[in-house]
Structures are given as C-alpha cells and as structure tokens.
Image (cartoon, grey):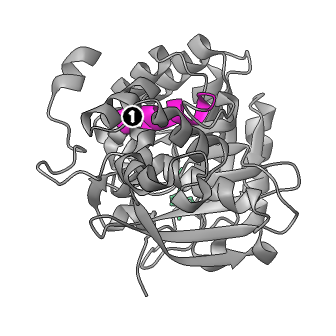
Amino acid sequence: MSDSERTTLPLVFDEPRGRKKPPPHLADLALDERVERLKELGLPGFRAKQLSNHYFARLVDDPAEMTDLPAAQRDELVAALLPDLMTPLRTMEADRGTTRKTLWKLFDGALVESVLMRYPDRATVCVSSQAGCGMACPFCATGQGGLQRNMSTAEIVEQVVAGARSMARGEVPGGPGRVSNVVFMGMGEPLANYKAVIGAVRRLVDPAPEGLGMSARGITVSTVGLVPRINQLTEEGIPVTLALSLHAPDDELRNELVPINTRFSVAETVDAAWNYARVTKRRVSIEYAMMRGINDQAWRADLLGDVLQERGDWGWVHVNLIPLNPTPGSKWTASDPADEREFVRRLEAKGIPTTVRDTRGREIDGACGQLAATEV
Ligand code: SAH
C-alpha cells in the first residue's frame, strides 16, 4: 500500500467528530489572519500586532498590562484574540521546585497535564497534544483512558507560554530564565493530531510577533510511529528532533507493547525514522522503556543494535533508555540495573550511542507515561 492510500484511509486514531471547538486564539492564526479576525469583528486590524507582541514577546495576556492599547477597547481586543483557553487546577512540585506538573482544565472540561523541568543549563516544557490518547500502549497511564479529543494549536502553545511565564517571573528556583526546549511527550500522540501540532511548532519557532522565536533544534516531537505522518513531517522543512517510541526491536513483542505496530511494522517504522534523519540531518532518538523480563534481554539489545546499525553507521540515531515508571494496574516493573547496564553495553558495542534518561517527577506522577490528568 502506498503512503497516499494509507493517509486517505479512515484512521483508527481519528477523534470523534462533531465536537465543539475551543474559541479561536491568536496562537491558532498567522499574523495576517489575526488582522483579518479583528477586522471581521469591526476592530482595528493593526492592533493584532500589538496583541501578538504582548502574548509572545512579553508573555502578557492581562488587559490591564496592555497600556499601549486604548483602555476602552482593551477588553474587547483581548476577548477577540486572547480568550481564556485553560485554567490551571493544580500544580505539583518535585526536585525542590525545579519540576512542576500543572493540571489544566480546558474550555469543555477536558483535563490535560504539562510538566516544566528546569536543569542547570536549560528548561524544558513537556506538552500534551491530545486530551487522553488513542494508542492504547498497555504500560502507559495515558493510554488506559482512551482518546477524548485533539487539542488545538493554541491550547498546545499556551502550555509553553505558561511555562515561559513561570520562568520569566522567577517562579522556578534558579532565578528568572527562559524556556529553551519543548518536548511533545505529554499526553497524546502528536502525529495523530498532525495539523494542530505542526501549527504549534510553527508558532513556537516563528519570531515575535508571529510566535515565540524558539530554536527548532530545541523541539522534540515524539511518536509511536505513524509512518505516513513521519513521512509528512520529513517533508515539512522544520528541523525538529524526532523521537520514536520503539520499545521492542521485533514485531511480535512490539505488537503487544505498541499496538499500532500491527499496522506499521518495526521495519517500516524504523525506515521512516531513518529517512527522517537522512533528509533533515537531525539525529533521531529511539525511546525504549526498559521493562523487566519483557524487552530487556541481552538478545533484544543485540537485535535492536542490528536493526539500527544495518541502516547506516553515520550517526543517524541514538537510543534513549527510559527506566519504566510505575502506572496504576501495570503488571510490569523497571529493569534490574545490571540488565540495564548490559543493554547499554551491547548497544554501544554495535556503535549505537545510548543514554539512560534521567527521569523527573516520578513522585508527582509527572514522569514519562504517568500523565493521566485525574482531578482529586
Ligand atoms: N505518544 C507519543 C508521545 C508520548 S511520549 C509517544 O508515544 O512517543 C511519552 C514517552 O514515555 C513515550 O516514549 C512512551 O512510550 C513512554 N512511556 C509510556 N509509559 C511509560 C512508562 N510507564 N514508563 C516509562 N516510559 C513510558
């Protein structure tokens, strides 16, 4: 089957139709569309640029702080392009406040989470791209609740802007700072919400007043491996880092751990990732959650090494091992540290650079695979 045939098939991961959309926000629109929107509402179009600067350059959305706008029109302008999209319900902290997980309530009551992580040399926001997730990976808490809905571009961007605000205002220990990295590793499968995610990436990268002006190199899009969408991303011309959640080098096990593998095999998926690296010159990251006695055997390390190595030794890939985080009802546990070390050793012996992820926020259920967005 060709890619184009595949993309036109009704996709199992499409969201239910006929839902109410979030109110339009300037982050959903390009600058000229923002101007148009204001004009449609009978408001002066040139104010779009000022509003955009407040939001993206100053990280301000409170009308009271927009003193360059006529006081009488401020509320109307803000209502037109900066509607409230989400309300923080709760923030939990770990690592002495340098890891902060926020639970958000969206306009329709849907709940999502984002995580801000500050390191000595960078700050990363881990964003959600869907409320829930339709991919049903059995070891991931998000996958257990199913998909509620796709998030809009602005709902995704707002998580980053909120993190940037916390950093700018010095709310995170370490003094005022900036967000340097964004990872699409929160709730949801980003490539199943392709259009909104690409819109968000563009808004993050475009300089103010169009967007936040971040470097594409600081952005990582993580996927279970929707092959046609990886191919589409390859053609997009935005050099983000691609992370592929592989978790097994063989179809038999991957069919169980990452059910979409029954649709796109390990070989097809790894080929698409390899091609992404070839075209974009960006090293792909293979994510591999280490599960005791399930996928952490020495022979699987060798097989993973072969699967990656046989596609080239020009540094197109590295492996990021993730110690499995506990999730409710999961029958799996993290690997023995000795098995993990052996796994690393075998991959490196085959010339595959390998790191073990320094997982943050486990104690606040904020780590990989733990985001479930439950209200308590
Ligand atoms: N749906 C995308 C984005 C989520 S990223 C994807 O799967 O890539 C979240 C990462 O955490 C994925 O690599 C996922 O497989 C991994 N993960 C899920 N549950 C986990 C768990 N319990 N412990 C460690 N990693 C987990």
Q: Which residue is drawn at 22% across and 43% down?
A: 14
For residue 241, say whether it is visible. Answer: no
Q: In the rendered structure, which segment of residues is drawn in magenta? A: 195-208
209 horizontally vs 251: left or right: right
**Horizontal and vertical percent position of residue 191:** 39, 37
Residue pictured at 47% horizontal, 36% vertical? 47
Q: Mark 1 points at which residue?
A: 44
The verdict on label 1 being within 8 Å of ligand 1 is no
Q: Position of residue 51 (x, y in %)?
A: 52, 42
Q: Is residue 181 visible?
A: yes
Q: Which part of the image, by quadrant, shows the N terminus?
A: top left
Compared with 95, 234 (above or below) is: above
What residue sits 80% from the left and 48% below the top? 122
Residue nearer the viewer, 242 or 90:
90
Residue 351, horizontal then vertical, whole percent: 78, 28
Where 204 sits versus 63, above or below?
above
**Residue sitting nearer the eye, 33 or 192:** 33
**Mark 1 residue type:** Pro
Instruction: Name the side, left or right, on which 331 lies relative to 284.
Output: left
Mark 1 is surrounded, within 10 Å at the Cα level, by few (under 14), some (14 to 19) or many (20 or more) other residues, namely some
Image quadrant in which the C terminus is located: bottom left
Q: Tell me the quarter of the picture where residue 26 sits.
A: top left
Secondary structure mostly seen in the magenta stretch: helix
Q: Which residue is drawn at 75% across and 40% down?
A: 354
137 in magenta: no
